[in-house]
Image: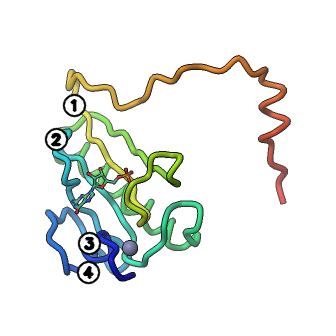
Amino acid sequence: MDNCIFCKIAKGEAPSYKIYEDDKTYAFLDISKDCYGHTLVVPKKHCENVLDCDEETLSCVIKTVKKIVNHYVKNCGFKGVNIINASGEEAQQTVFHLHFHILPRMSKDEYDAFPSLCGTIAPFEQQQELLKLELN
Ligand code: 5GP
Ligand code: ZN
């Protein structure tokens, strides 16, 4: 897609620090330098996020995420990972080409990648009534 920075990176038309590539996916370091090893995994085919992505493309991206996180823990000295995705502007997505963030974790790395939320008083029954999904 024209003017999509992650399409350009995945095609090698814009610079990136590549971590991994196969025929369907591309992984590279996030530009932010906010934590050691912050990695983004994207499909080569453009889609905006999890909501509009076809299942096959999503499955390829998730397989690459797994490959990389297993590599980080097995071979690179990390002890765990946070995997984060924002789908939609309201979910704080800023680049509208599907991507998963990998934040590799060390013991005592002293940052908090899991948000502390402000809480809800809505009863569980009400939430379940709105949210439940039948098997089809
Ligand atoms: P989002 O907020 O959409 O979940 O995450 C977008 C991420 O893309 C941010 O963490 C941001 O630092 C990263 N990013 C934005 N532009 C570039 C770029 O040109 N190159 C790289 N490597 N990362 C980028
Ligand atoms: Zn794109």
Q: Compared to 35, does 6 lie above or below? A: below
Nearer-N-terminus badge (2/1): 2
Q: Residue 53 location in percent, x, y?
A: 55, 69
Q: How many marks?
A: 4
Q: Secondary structure at mark 4?
A: loop
Query: Label 2 to label 4, Cα distance in Å?
Result: 25 Å
Q: Is mark 3 within 8 Å of ligand 1?
A: no
Q: At 45% across and 60% down in the image, what residue appears?
A: 62
Front-most of residues 22 and 43: 43
Front-most of residues 3 and 30: 3
Residue named by callout 4: 11
Residue named by callout 2: 36
Q: Are marks 2 and 1 in contact (CB under 8 Å)?
A: yes
Q: Regarding ligand 1, which quadrant of the image does it lie in?
A: bottom left
Q: Residue 35 location in percent, x, y?
A: 19, 39
Q: Quadrant of the C terminus?
A: bottom right
Q: Are marks 1 and 3 in contact (CB under 8 Å)?
A: no
Residue named by callout 1: 106
For label 3, count other residues whose C-alpha is less than 10 Å away and answer few (under 14), some (14-19) or many (20+): some
